[in-house]
């Protein structure tokens, strides 16, 4: 399963910013970023890769905490917003690039973070290549931290539709379907502004089981991986989110 590049790019655009950035909880994003960095074992002031970085919700607080943080994202719009949030300091470095071909030398980073369900848009084989590419730029013993939705939780709590208020009279509607044979969730998000104007985007995500992701990480060359239920280290369960810490 692979969404077209056009559908992928259309979603991760100004539409994504309007759906997520304006209601982002900066304190929660900082908590997540620093917890993920601790799980990764990145040394204080170390080199950490946030991939993909989106609009910098984790990259910016990592840099402010003293890490040499580098964020990479395919979306020019999201990278531009990340740069605006980062200001003019030396760190973070924010780079527009596709995570299938990272523009870094081998063994450039102490740790890497892949947060907020950022795998599943390319299909099993290509996502495994993404994991191998992240492994390539990690130093020996470096760790990748993945934080994502997983199939067991999705199925147990599946909702065909929901909505949330975004402020200024705006509403985000989401309608979903799930193909249990393919493990693919399709979502259509619709933004409704205060005047009633509507704009929609549809995207598909391959929702992996923990077992599938562990197999993919092994196939990508990681030496060992362990599953947790959140970034604070709680036990993994069918109803928790999935956090995987994988060592190069």
Image (cartoon, helix red, strand yellow):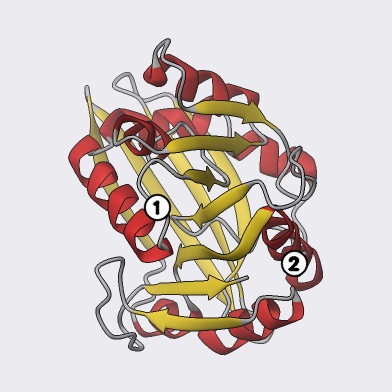
27 on left or right of 18: left
- Where is residue 108? Give x, y as percent: 66, 46
CA–CA distance in space, label 1 to label 2: 33 Å
Estimate how packed mark 2 is, as few (under 14), some (14 to 19) or many (20 or more) residues with alpha carbons within 10 Å.
some
Quadrant hosting residue 211:
bottom right
* Quadrant in which the C terminus is drawn: bottom right
Q: Is residue 91 above or below residue 74?
A: above
Q: Residue at x 24, y 36 (%)?
A: 26
Secondary structure at numbered mark 1: loop
- Where is residue 115? Give x, y as percent: 46, 55
Q: Is residue 149 above or below residue 78?
A: below
| Picture disc at residue 8 | none
* Quadrant in which the N terminus is drawn: bottom right
The residue furthest top is 88
42 on left or right of 23: right
- Where is residue 206? Give x, y as percent: 63, 69
Residue bearing mark 2: 123
Query: How many labels sit on residues?
Result: 2
Question: Which comes sooner in the sequence, label 1 or label 2?
Answer: 1
Q: Nearer the viewer, residue 24 or 37?
A: 37
Q: Residue at x 53, y 51 (%)?
A: 188
175 on left or right of 77: left
146 on left or right of 21: right
| Picture disc at residue 43 | 1
Secondary structure at numbered mark 2: loop
Q: Nearer the viewer, residue 24 or 8?
A: 24
Quadrant hosting residue 39:
bottom left
Q: Residue at x 31, y 78 (%)?
A: 240
Estimate how packed mark 1 is, as few (under 14), some (14 to 19) or many (20 or more) residues with alpha carbons within 10 Å.
few
- Where is residue 96? Give x, y as percent: 67, 29
Quadrant hosting residue 229:
bottom left
């Amino acid at each position: 399963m692979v969404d077209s590049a056009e559908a992928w790019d259309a979603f991760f655009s100004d539409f994504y910013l309007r759906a997520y950035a304006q209601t982002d909880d900066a304190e929660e994003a900082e908590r997540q970023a620093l917890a993920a960095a601790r799980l990764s074992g990145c040394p204080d002031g170390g080199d950490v890769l946030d991939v993909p970085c989106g609009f910098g919700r984790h990259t910016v607080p990592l840099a402010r905490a003293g890490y040499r943080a580098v964020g990479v994202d395919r979306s020019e719009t999201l990278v531009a917003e990340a740069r605006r949030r980062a200001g003019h300091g030396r760190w973070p470095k924010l780079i527009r690039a596709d995570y299938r071909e990272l523009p870094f030398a081998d063994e450039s980073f102490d740790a890497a973070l892949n947060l907020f369900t950022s795998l599943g848009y390319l299909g099993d084989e290509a996502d495994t290549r993404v994991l191998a590419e992240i492994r390539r730029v990690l130093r020996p013993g470096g760790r990748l931290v993945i934080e994502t939705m997983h199939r067991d939780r999705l199925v147990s709590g599946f909702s065909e539709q929901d909505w949330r208020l975004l402020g200024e009279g705006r509403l985000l509607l989401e309608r979903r379907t799930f193909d249990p044979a393919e493990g693919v969730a399709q979502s259509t998000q619709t933004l409704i502004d205060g005047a009633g104007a509507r704009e929609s985007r549809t995207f598909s995500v391959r929702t992996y089981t923990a077992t599938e992701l562990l197999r993919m990480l092994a196939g990508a060359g990681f030496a060992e991986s362990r599953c947790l239920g959140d970034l604070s280290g709680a036990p993994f369960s069918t109803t928790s989110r999935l956090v995987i810490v994988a060592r190069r």
